[in-house]
Amino acid sequence: MNIPLIGFGTYDIPRKNTERCVRQAIELGYRLIDTAQMYNNEAETGVAVRECGIKREELFVQTKLSSPCRTVQAAVDSFHQSFDRMKLDYIDLMLIHWPQGGETETWKALEQIQRVGLVKHIGVSNFYPGKWGELCQSVNVKPCLNQIECNVFYQQRPMREYMAKADCMVQAWQPLGEGARKIFSNETIREIGSAHRKTAAQVALRFLVQQGISVIPRSQNPEHMKENIDILDFVLTEDEMNKIRALDTGHSQYGWPSDAWRY
């Protein structure tokens, strides 16, 4: 799977602003766009992708099925709701958003849809080893990507090691933690940023990308969009990486238990 490491997230961007934000992101160089059924902005994302002037094959568009589907047909129908809203010839990556029940049936539907070419790749989001193991027992195609909470204060090292053994890429949602835990004023991150003439946000994103973790930060501010993608012209030293590793609290910002990666 040839997926850009830096993407643009649309979570919590209102529908009225989504088309503008996605267009601006693409103009700034983003080639990975993330949306989901529950974000209620798939249609606006599709318009921006169709009308941005960039060849479709140069963009990587991903979305997610949100509601639990108890049958294969229900999952197929749910996929086509997204497909019809986005009005694209194909979707690059379709994820199961949460393990809420019916994962096996939903996955069988995604395998069928992948075979006919409406989706290029299939993956999951928020699947920890227990649910991952249950799913993989009865599938023909294993998930190529797992989108999970991951940032400098919750680095998910055990979970990432588990995914690496499964040959599954990790993608970080909320890679800046919505600015919580004073990430932008953290002394360690700011000092490292000063050494590279980069902001704390850029250092925090670079830390993840440098480890092969895909990131999908969101913003409605064009200056912040530009800042977030401008992280490929510097490299953190191993000493700097270790200093950031030491910031890991091992605790989710959103209430996952500390040993959630085992579930």
Image: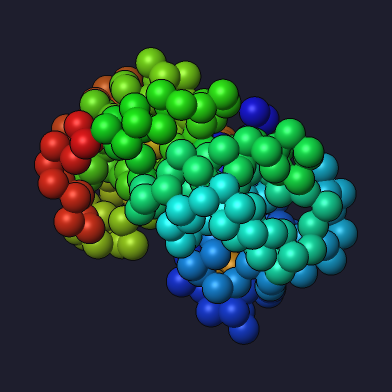
How many numbered dots are placed on residues in this image?
A: 0
Tell me if residue 125 comes above or below residue 239 in the rendering: below
Q: Is residue 51 visible?
A: yes
Q: Residue at x 69, y 59 (%)?
A: 80
Q: Position of residue 71 (x, y in %)?
A: 52, 51
In the picture provided, is 189 more to the left or to the right than 137? left
Name the outermost residue toward the top: 165
Q: Position of residue 49 (x, y in %)?
A: 76, 60
Q: Is residue 45 visible?
A: no
In the picture provided, is 49 more to the left or to the right than 188? right
Quadrant of the rendering where the C terminus is positioned: top left
Q: Residue at x 51, y 69 (%)?
A: 39
Q: Position of residue 173 (x, y in %)?
A: 41, 50
**What is the quadrant of residue 226 in the picture?**
bottom right
Q: Position of residue 240 (x, y in %)?
A: 29, 29
Name the outermost residue toward the bottom: 16
Coloring applied to the structure? rainbow
In the picture provided, is 166 more to the left or to the right than 63? left
Quadrant of the rendering where the N terminus is positioned: top right
Q: Looking at this view, is 234 or 68 the one in front? A: 68
Q: Residue at x 17, y 56 (%)?
A: 255
Q: Residue at x 51, y 27 (%)?
A: 139
Q: Looking at this view, is 116 or 22 the one in front? A: 116
Q: Looking at this view, is 169 or 191 the one in front? A: 169
Tell me if residue 95 comes above or below residue 131 in the rendering: below
Q: Looking at this view, is 239 or 20 the one in front? A: 20
Tell me if residue 7 comes above or below residue 158 in the rendering: below
In the picture provided, is 164 more to the left or to the right than 11? left
